[in-house]
Image (tube, rainbow, N blue to C red):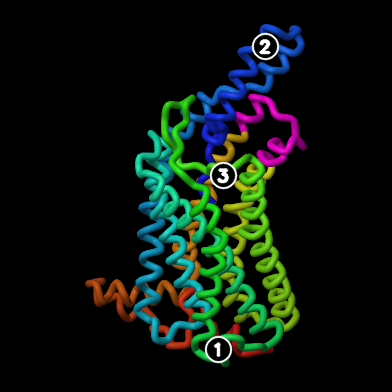
Amino acid sequence: MVPEMSKHQVLDASNFAFLLENCSSSYDYEENETDFCCASSPCPQDFSLNFDRAFLPTLYGLLFLLGLLGNGAVATVLLKQREVLSSTDTFLLNLAVADALLVLTLPLWAVDAAVQWVFGTGLCKVAGALFNINFYAGAFLLACISFDRYLSIVHATQLYRRGPPTRVALTCIVVWGLCLLFALPELIFLSAHHDERLNATHCQYNFPQVGHTALRMLQLVAGFLLPLMVMAYCYARILAVLLVSRGQRRLRAMRIVVVVVVVFALCWTPYHLVVLVDTLMDLGALARDCGREKFVDVAKSITSGLGFMHCCLNPLLYAFVGVKFRERMGMLLMRLGYPSQRRHKLHLPSHRDSSWSETTEASYSGL
């Protein structure tokens, strides 16, 4: 998923030239036909364009700094314990890498929004593909964690704990492979395209509108709805089992996992709803007018920023909700010169504890 462009960036030069040609010949038609032609011309985009120039570079710059620092800290903490990582921690490490790689592309999109795309077609394809790969990876890895916990608690099946040590690594490889497959449209169809109306170059797709609509539907279904349905089903079943068994310790262990899923839904649902409305307007299912189009363009910019904020929120959730993560971060800070007098306040975690929940032993002990 490349950050959504406004309508002034989606309409290519050939389509615009076609509209100009038809509207310029409208003097030969009756008055009602002239009105129809002019009604089909592109809406003015001054407001949404100015909004993007003011809003997106600042937001992307802030998210870049916060996301890189936060996910870098998560990855550092987990890599320090890489010999004893649980399956949840391994998925978490991959999630931090995915989030960090996604925010690495944000400065490029900030320049694109503020001025134009100045990095050429090659980097346009790479940045778009990298962005899309990690957009899908975040959702898929959260779904993997949900499914692992579901099997462990509901069915008492230790898929990764009792299987070959390489099983979790193979799962991560499959996830990254699927993400690369879903990013092929970016590698093939993205290019640095010069917009004649704006007299500027932007990184955008060079296929027809039907292809753009199909890609949006793929992102909605594969990158959001299906992972969210897997997470919702798994955690609903888990919570039902734990509530019946009065497993308060296990409920506490599930706290951060459920919070992460809820935050994922809250961050990405508004964006996908706005994109769905925009797609319905493209398909003619909803009437399009300039006022509604301006509202949708601005809403896409705001809700996409909320979605990208998800990359920065995960590390904060681990720090404020995950007890073991805070302890391991404290150990790391002590090695870097953190005051030794506070060492006694830290309870060192066992090798089998998860970094992001209070304990994995509660999850794996069966019912």
Asked if residue 124 is positioned above or below residue 76 in the image, the reply reads above
Direction left: furthest residue:
337
The amino acid beneath tag 3 is Thr
- Secondary structure category for the residue under label 1: loop
- When asked about the image quadrant of residue 232, the answer is bottom right
Residue indicated by mark 1:
161
Percent of width and height locating residue 86: 49, 83
Q: Camera-side residue: 258 or 29? A: 29
The three-letter amino acid code for the residue at tag 2 is: Ser
Residue 335 spot, x, y in % from top left: 25, 76
Does the CB distance between marks 1 and 3 fall below 8 Å? no
* Most common secondary structure along the magenta stretch: helix
283 within the magenta span: yes
Is 39 situated above or below 207?
above
The magenta stretch spans which residues?
A: 277-295
Upstream in the sequence, badge 1 or badge 3? 1
Rendered location of residue 355, percent (x, y): 46, 77
Asked whether the viewer can see residue 328, the reply is yes
